Amino acid sequence: MGNLNIDVENISIPEVQTELGGGISVSGTIALEEAYYKQHDLQKAQKLAMDILKQNPNDPTAKKILKLIEYESKGNQALMRGDYSTALQYFQKMQEIDPNNKWAKKGIIRAQSGG
């Protein structure tokens, strides 16, 4: 057997970026969570979630946040109509999905107190 000489200085190693399935980066999911949980910008969060789902239709975080936004919007609409029992149901559905969701908790309090 002969000697194998490898010039390790000339080996190129491609950069690896952290990605979720479908080419969505972890930073996309972080931006989505930031938009919903910290900024509470529902329009921005909805757009980010939809963009993520275009790339990865099964992304659990995007699906969860879209459902939370849907229920929160419906709950708030019910509150504005004075339909507190319906509002309460939507906020409770949010809490089933995300037990520590502060927006669900606030909505439940508002619905139970009549606005």
Image (cartoon, grey):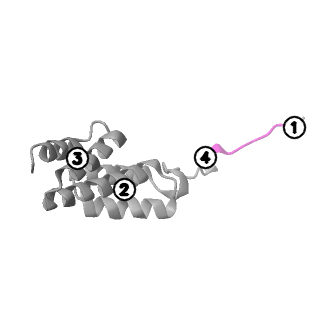
Farthest-out residue, right: 1
Q: Secondary structure at mark 4?
A: helix
Circle 4: is it few (<14), some (14-19), or many (20+) Cα within 10 Å? few
- Residue designated by label 2: 66
**In this view of the protein, which residue sits in the foreground, 111 or 35?**
111
Figure quadrant of the N terminus? top right
For the point 49% across and 51% down, which residue is it?
19
For the point 25% across and 59% down, which residue is it?
73
* Separation (CA) of disc 1 from disc 4: 21 Å
Locate residue 66, reporting x and y percent: 36, 56
Locate residue 77, reporting x and y percent: 20, 61
For the point 42% across and 64% down, which residue is it?
51
For the point 51% across and 58% down, which residue is it?
57
The residues colored magenta run 3-9
* Separation (CA) of disc 2 from disc 3: 19 Å
Mark closer to the chain start, 4 or 2: 4
- Residue designated by label 4: 9
- Residue designated by label 1: 2
Q: Is residue 15 visible?
A: no
Q: Is residue 39 above or below residue 55?
A: above
Q: Secondary structure at mark 3?
A: helix
- Amino acid type for the residue under numbered disc 2: Leu
Mark closer to the chain start, 2 or 3: 2
- Residue designated by label 3: 88
